[in-house]
Amino acid sequence: MALSDAQLERYSRHLILKQVGVKGQKKLLASKVLVIGAGGLGCPVLQYLAAAGVGTLGICDGDVVSLSNLQRQILYTTEEIGEPKVECAKRRLSAMNPDVTFETYDYYLTPENILGVIAPYDMVVDCVDSFAVKYLINDACVQAKKPFVHGGILGFSGQCLTVLPDTACFRCFFRDPPPKEVAPTCAEAGVIGVIPGLLGSIQATEVIKYLTGVGTLLTNTLLVVHADEMEFTPLPVPGRDEDCPVCGAHPTITTLELAEQEACELKS
């Protein structure tokens, strides 16, 4: 299908890039991406993917807008406090780009519903601040052979990793959740407001690269960012850990579970 005159103008800065062009833009318009978590990380991921013309965006979050969100969650306004985040995000993003179709999931993911939610999508983006859900996303995507981009933030720091069906998964780097005493939540330890924008932009970049086939992804590499010193450190591994309980040679985690621990995570 040919791009319309409006699309030729809207995406003109993509179209003149030899790495993207009309072919790449059509790939974006035909793609489906699920963003799990419409908070600090999810807001910039959703904004940039909607602006880029990803054809279908799923927004999954059971939370409502609160006053403390507004320091970093840039999709929302003071007037929207108390409203479901997925509805506020859809309203704002639809006004930005009517080319995009939005599917909303105004609830939290569980072992019972996650496989059904992720099934229609080409890629998943982990934008949650819960250890339990991060491991659930990883395990479900590995089992379903669904590519996903992990992101985590805390304080002035963050990290990003892209996982494909044949690359190291999140558990290859972090086998089990750390003890609660060494994993403070964002509410306990704080997060500078711009950090989710920085890491969310990296996550959105990984998604666009994957969908268009451009560049080198952060596969088998955990990118750790310390913005207070403006240090970007890639931590590579050779590939899948053969002893990984999810993606290894002899997986021991074959059913999905939701751990009790919930915390915003970062491990350097």
Image (cartoon, rainbow, N blue to C red):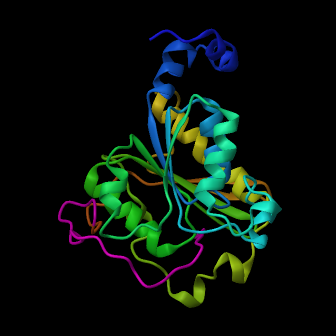
Q: Position of residue 119 (x, y in %)?
A: 32, 49
Say left or right for 112 vs 35. left
Total residue callouts: 0
Residue nearest the viewer, comparing 237 with 151 = 151
Is 252 a magenta residue? yes
In the picture, which quadrant includes the C terminus?
bottom right
Say left or right for 241 vs 227. left
Q: Is residue 83 above or below residue 189?
A: above
Is 108 a magenta residue? no
Q: Quadrant of residue 246?
A: bottom left
In the picture, which quadrant includes the N terminus?
top left
Q: State the residue at coordinates (72%, 80%).
A: 189
- Please tell me whether the stretch drawn in magenta is mainly helix, strand or loop: loop
Q: Is residue 217 above or below residue 246?
A: above
Residue nearest the viewer, comparing 244 with 83 = 83
Q: State the residue at coordinates (79%, 58%).
A: 77
Q: Position of residue 67 (x, y in %)?
A: 78, 71
- Report the residue that reaches farthest toward the left: 250
The residue segment tinted magenta is 246-268
